[in-house]
Amino acid sequence: MVGPLVLSRALDANKADHGSLGVLGGDTGSVGAAFLSARAALMTGAGRVYVVRPSLADGYVLDPLVPELMVVEACHCQEKPIDTWVAGPGLGMSSLARTYFEATLRADRPLVIDADGLNLLSIDAALATLCRQRAAPTILTPHPGEAARLLGLKTSEIQANRASAVTALAEKYHAHVVLKGYQTLIALLGQPTLTNHTGNPSLATAGTGDVLAGFMGSLLAQGVQVDLAAIHAVRIHGLAADRLAARLGGVWGLTASELIPEIRAVLNAEQR
């Protein structure tokens, strides 16, 4: 149903023209999740990307592989020009994590909620209410287990009727919802549910969901409208995995880090 994603970039563009994204996450022991998400955003065109961590006490103040990423403590993020958020990769479930996650829900900014952001929503009625009340674009990106927690069901019940589940999530949280898995479903508010047909089992490995969330946030930061950001991020993420599987000769051993430059390659190819 959809063609290529065509973006524009003026010859005299500067980084401020292509959005500033904040990735809220990276609690101690899970900083890699936030770095993966942020790397994906930076390598798909976001002008500036901040890794916003609840605490910097463990000393991770730099991504050693991508020093272009800016790592800041959440208590100082109000000083940064963040206009789009991804909340949840490696965030943790602490009271501090909850405090800053609530702040992103209250911010009048586009927001992608993934991982521990979804888990916090599932256990905290006040946060769920804030999500429903948001006026800015919101995308939830659960895998089946997270979807089950959000709806108070078993994972097997989600998988038995994925179409009903993704619609129920969109209605309950008043958000666009990407239900990940085989033939990922995309429920867009006020539109028919869509089914994605790219991707393969190589994506069943740690970190690929963090990459998807960062890519989706990058598109939002660059001004892509919310429904197209959800659709194209899912499609291109899967297509990149298909290309890698073809090149590697199978679906075993893909890592999330490898996926990011392939997504960039697909994105650039669609601009020609």
Image (tube, rainbow, N blue to C red):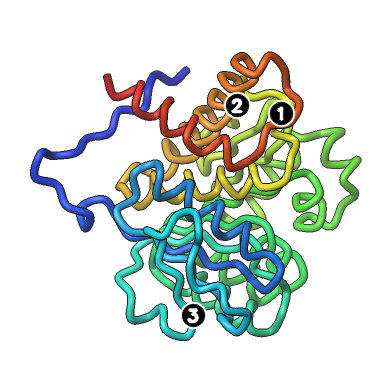
Q: Estimate the spatial distance between the alpha carbons at disc 1 and disc 2, rounded to whole Å.
A: 7 Å
Query: Which residue, as the protein is rendered here, is positioned at the far front?
Result: 64
Query: Measured along the vertical axis of the image, is residue 271 above or below residue 15?
Result: above
Q: Earlier in the sequence, mark 3 or mark 1?
A: 3
Query: Measured along the vertical axis of the image, is residue 142 above or below residue 182?
Result: below
Query: Measured along the vertical axis of the image, is residue 198 above or below residue 68?
Result: above
**In the rendered image, which quarter contains the C terminus?**
top left
Task: List the residue tagged with mark 3.
Answer: 73
The structure residue drawn at horizontal position 29% and vertical position 24%, both measured from the top left corner, is 271
Which disc number belongs to residue 130? none
Relative side of 199 to 204, left or right: left
Q: Secondary structure at mark 1?
A: helix
Q: Estimate the spatial distance between the alpha carbons at disc 3 and disc 1, rounded to whole Å.
A: 34 Å
Q: Residues within 10 Å of mark 1 (few under 14, many from 20)?
A: some
Q: Earlier in the sequence, mark 2 or mark 3?
A: 3
Splitting the image into 4 quarters, where does residue 186 fall? top right
The amino acid pointed to by label 1 is: Ser
The structure residue drawn at horizontal position 68% and vertical position 32%, both measured from the top left corner, is 254
* Residue 188 position within the rendered picture, expressed as x and y whole percent measured from the top left: 53, 40
Task: List the residue tagged with mark 2.
Answer: 241
- Proximity of marks 1 and 2: CB atoms separated by less than 8 Å: yes
The structure residue drawn at horizontal position 33% and vertical position 58%, both measured from the top left corner, is 48
User: Viewer-proximal residue, 201 or 217?
Assistant: 201
* Residue 113 position within the rendered picture, expressed as x and y whole percent measured from the top left: 58, 57
Relative side of 216 to 93, left or right: left
Q: Estimate the spatial distance between the alpha carbons at disc 2 and disc 3, rounded to whole Å.
A: 33 Å
The amino acid pointed to by label 2 is: Ala
The amino acid pointed to by label 3 is: Glu
User: Viewer-proximal residue, 209 or 109?
Assistant: 209
